[in-house]
Amino acid sequence: MVKFLLWLLLFVVCWPLALLALILWPVVWLLSLPFRLVGIAVEGVFGLLRGLILLPARVLGGAR
């Protein structure tokens, strides 16, 4: 809702820029999609490494 209100404010202030943003938003979203996928993969790898490093502490009962 806030994004829509900000877009309406931009539309009132500078309507060509608002229409350009409306048209270019799907292109920007598509271009950022691979970076999001890489971020998800890196986060998964770090989670796996964290789990492997903390496994001995969990087995010994240190982290509950």
Image (cartoon, rainbow, N blue to C red):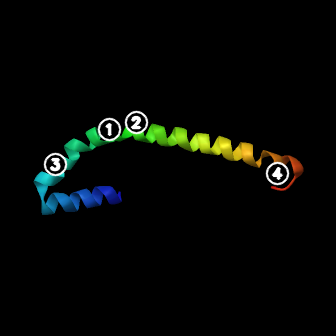
SS type, badge 2: helix
28 or 61: nearer the eye? Answer: 61
Q: Are marks 1 and 2 in contact (CB under 8 Å)?
A: yes
Q: Quadrant of residue 8?
A: bottom left
How packed mark 3 is, by other alpha carbons closer than 10 Å (few <14, some 14-19, many 20 or more), is: some
- Residue shown at 14% from the left, 63% from the top: 13
Which mark's residue is nearer the viewer, 2 or 4? Answer: 4
How packed mark 2 is, by other alpha carbons closer than 10 Å (few <14, some 14-19, many 20 or more), is: few
Which residue is tagged 4? 57
How packed mark 4 is, by other alpha carbons closer than 10 Å (few <14, some 14-19, many 20 or more), is: few
- Amino acid type of disc 4? Ala
- Amino acid type of disc 2? Pro
Which residue is tagged 1? 31
Q: Earlier in the sequence, mark 4 or mark 3?
A: 3
In the rendering, at what x and y percent does residue 28 appear?
A: 29, 42
In the rendering, at what x and y percent does residue 54 appear?
A: 76, 49
SS type, badge 4: helix
For the C terminus, the quadrant is bottom right
Which residue is tagged 3? 19
Which mark's residue is nearer the viewer, 2 or 3? Answer: 2
23 or 2: nearer the eye? Answer: 23
Q: Which mark is residue 54?
A: none
Which mark's residue is nearer the viewer, 4 or 3? Answer: 4
- Amino acid type of disc 3? Leu
